[in-house]
Amino acid sequence: MAAVLCRKYSISPRDVYEKGHIAELQQMLVHSGQYIPGVNATFPGDLAGEAKITTSGTLSLSALPGNSEWRTLNQHTAIMLPIPKGKTPQFTFNVKAGQPTVLQVAFHVSQRADHFTPDERLSIKEYALEAGTAVIDVNFSLTRKESGYGFIIFQKNEQVSIEQSDVRITGLRK
């Protein structure tokens, strides 16, 4: 994208910054689908920015029912959820172990509120599993000073599978 600006204005890559074209570059990137924290897409003549958005209802997330399909933890696997201010909720998961093993489950957050990268571990729990299916209750016993997104991360363990859900909820906000 920077090369497009260089050609458009007959400038060098350094000039994109020095001659004040960074905002234009950012808009080009955002319009192509890139996420840049703190940069909102602008579209000249677009009336969407003037729209008033209201909700017609709310969803209180209490469960994502299993669908009897299992995902082997052959890599770290995570779920990102909005976590309210105060005590973190308890989570319940259906797991299946091929043999006795230990499953590690971690709780991460982003160090920056405007990011969605699980780069700060706040807690990790271990669960001894016997061969077969089990229900584990995960309680990180944390108190959050503010609401935000949390990441429940199941550490890689090829002996363990976790039950999946067909429920997909888009647009969950903190």
Image (cartoon, grey):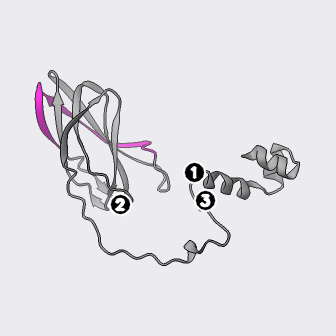
State the residue position of label 3: 39
Number of labels in the image equals 3
Within the image, what quadrant is residue 171 found in? bottom left
Mark nearer the N terminus (3 vs 1): 1
In the image, 137: left or right of 81?
Answer: left
Instruction: Identify which amino acid the numbered label 3 is placed on.
Output: Val
Instruction: Please give the name of the residue rendered at 32% of the width and 26% of the height, measured from the top-left corner.
Output: 74
Q: Is residue 76 visible?
A: yes
Q: Is residue 131 magenta?
A: yes
In the image, 91: left or right of 16?
Answer: left
Instruction: Please give the name of the residue rendered at 35% of the width and 32% of the height, measured from the top-left corner.
Output: 76
Within the image, what quadrant is residue 148 found in? bottom left
Closest to the camera, between mark 2 and mark 3, is: 3
Residue 35: x %, y % from top left: 56, 51
Magenta stretch prevailing secondary structure: strand
Mark nearer the N terminus (2 vs 3): 3
- Above or below 74: residue 14: below
